[in-house]
Structures are given as C-alpha cells and as structure tokens.
Image: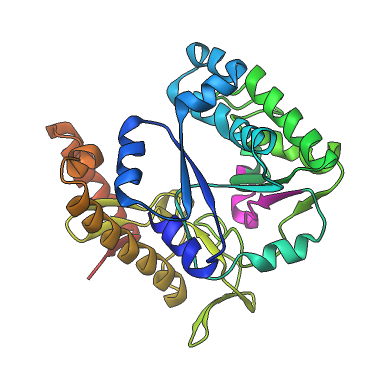
C-alpha cells in the first residue's frame, strides 16, 4: 500500500500490474480498489508459463518466488500491449517522480540498480553487485534478449544458495552489462537508497525535500523495517551496522513508518476479517520472545525507532 500510494502520488500516470501470491492478497487489494492497478492471480501466470509452474515442486517457497521475478515481466511483455515494464519490490517508498531515472537511461533497453556498498561493506558484493528492487525492460530486441536469458537462467537454477556466479534471482544481474547491449546501470543518486548504502553519501532534509548528493531522493528501499510492538519499529539498520545519527536519514525512515502505520489502520478497517497482528507476529510465546530480544538488541544498537 505504501509503495503503490507513494508511486501514484509522485507519478500519477503510473499503472501497476500486481502479481498476487495468495488468494488473501488478491481479495485484500480488490477490496482496496485502487484505480491504477490490475491484479494477476498466481494461477494465471502459472497457466501462461507452464515452465515456471513446473519448478514449484523443486524449490522452497521463497526460492519459487525468486524464480518468478523474470517470469512476470516476460509474461506482461509477451502477452499484453506493454512497451516497457519496471519490476518493483513492494517494500519501497517514493519521495519524488521516477522520471529522472528514465531520462538518465535514455534509450537503454534495461535498467538495473547498483547496491552501492560502501568500502566497509565491500564483502557483501559476493551476493551481487545489483539489487532486484528495480528492474526495467523494454520490448526491444536487446531488452527481450536479456530478459529471455534471465528467465531461462532462473528456471534452470534459482536457489537460496551462494555460488561463485549465482545466488537466487539476484547475482544473475552481474552478467547483464557484460553479456548484453543496452543495459543502463542506474546512476541517479536518488534512486536505490537503502540501509546498506546510506553511509558515505550526503543526505540532507531541506524545505524542498530530501536530497542525496544534491539530487532529489526518488525512492527508498525500506528493507528490514518491521513493526515490533506498539509504537516501536525495527529500522533494519543493525544488520549493516548503519547509523541513525543523520536527522535526514531518520526523517526518511519515520516518513515510511508513518505511512505504514496509516496503511495498516486503513487495511484493518476495510479488511476486518484479516488478522494482521496474527500474521505479523504469530500467536505463540516463542515469537513474542524473539520480538522482545530484537527490541533489546536494537535499543542497544540505537537502531530502534519509535513512531511518536
């Protein structure tokens, strides 16, 4: 909800195709009735792509979801009148229009997002130089050639295992600029800001908005943000040893959390039959113990955020 609403706020012409991985997701988004999205049942995609469906029994659920990544844009570009498609992770929030990212890419057929790890986190490059959060493909020969290779690679092997040249759906992106023409590596500093790359860049909160290296922040990848209990949220920063000392960084996270809190309340009212607390936390004692442990760890690391 946060990603969709923030995207439409800053890019009113956007139209989003949402793949619903469960009937509950489909029913929930149908009830919310966003006018700028279309919903796709997972069964619809599987029926259109039997090669994808055939992999389901061979990998875990998360690995199957990884496998879907290139199959969804392939399905849309080959079966519908779509000239360009951009895959977006759900845990993102837009602060400005994404148009500058497309402008920078010019006539490129593919856009990928660099992790931009600071030197201290350079070892994390073993998981891939690029992040799957934003992937754009055009319905051109270079774009479809790249996407076809990516889809076939994931259908053949897409496991939650690190190998020299493979990891899930992510490390295949390392090969894009090497193997294919028309691949643009996102250079706009306002795109792809995330917990792993806030270090080493100048981030400022001004009256005109939040800026990253003197460019407007376009989207933040809110990986790791989690509602723990009450007004307390995990920032996800402790995993990367990142700091909340910069007021502008804290403003980004609090903005996302406020939007998340609002969306949760709206969803709870409109979708009264959904047990969000049960889904989020589980209903067992061990789950609550884990939450309390995380509260303590993040409070000690100073990466815990209180909404109010």
**Image-based side of 164 in relation to 39, left or right:** right
Residue nearer the viewer, 140 or 308:
140
Residue nearer the viewer, 152 or 224:
152
Quarter of the picture containing the C terminus is bottom left
Quarter of the picture containing the N terminus is bottom left
Image coords of residue 182 (percent x, y): 84, 48
**Image-based side of 140 in relation to 86, left or right:** right
Image coords of residue 260 (percent x, y): 32, 59
* Magenta stretch encompasses residue 250: no
Q: Find the magenta span and give its range.
A: 110-124
Image coords of residue 214 (percent x, y): 64, 79
Image coords of residue 33 (percent x, y): 35, 51
- Name the residue rendered at 67%, 52% in the picture: 114
Location of residue 188 with respect to 109 vertically, above or below: below
Q: How many marks?
A: 0
* Figure colour scheme: rainbow
Residue nearer the viewer, 206 or 26:
26
- Name the residue rendered at 56%, 61% in the picture: 193
Location of residue 152 with respect to 139 vertically, above or below: above
- Name the residue rendered at 30%, 34% in the picture: 24
Residue 63 seen by the camera: no
> Residue lying farthest bottom?
207
Residue 2 seen by the camera: yes
């Amino acid at each position: 909800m946060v990603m969709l609403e923030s995207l439409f706020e800053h890019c009113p012409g956007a139209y989003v195709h949402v793949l619903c991985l469960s009937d509950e997701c489909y029913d929930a988004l149908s009830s919310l009735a966003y006018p700028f999205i279309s919903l796709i049942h997972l069964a619809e995609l599987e029926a259109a792509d039997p090669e994808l469906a055939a992999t389901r029994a061979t990998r875990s659920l998360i690995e199957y979801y990884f496998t879907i990544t290139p199959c969804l844009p392939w399905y849309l570009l080959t079966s519908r009148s779509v000239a360009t498609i951009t895959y977006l992770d759900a845990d993102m929030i837009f602060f400005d229009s994404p148009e500058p990212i497309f402008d920078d890419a010019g006539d490129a057929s593919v856009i990928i997002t660099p992790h931009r790890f600071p030197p201290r986190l350079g070892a994390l490059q073993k998981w891939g130089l690029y992040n799957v959060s934003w992937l754009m493909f055009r319905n051109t020969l270079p774009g479809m050639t790249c996407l076809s290779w990516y889809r076939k690679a994931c259908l053949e092997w897409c496991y939650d295992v690190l190998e020299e040249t493979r990891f899930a759906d992510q490390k295949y992106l390392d090969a894009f600029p090497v193997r294919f023409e028309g691949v643009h590596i996102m250079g706009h500093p306002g795109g792809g800001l995330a917990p792993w790359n806030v270090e080493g860049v100048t981030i400022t909160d001004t009256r005109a908005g939040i800026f990253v290296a003197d460019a407007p922040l376009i989207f933040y990848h809110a990986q790791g943000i989690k509602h723990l209990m009450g007004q307390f949220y995990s920032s996800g920063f402790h995993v990367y040893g990142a700091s909340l000392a910069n007021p502008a960084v804290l403003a980004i996270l609090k903005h996302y959390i406020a939007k998340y809190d609002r969306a949760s309340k709206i969803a709870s009212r409109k979708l009264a039959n959904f047990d969000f607390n049960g889904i989020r936390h589980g209903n067992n004692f061990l789950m609550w113990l884990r939450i309390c442990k995380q509260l303590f760890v993040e409070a000690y690391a100073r990466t815990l955020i209180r909404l109010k």
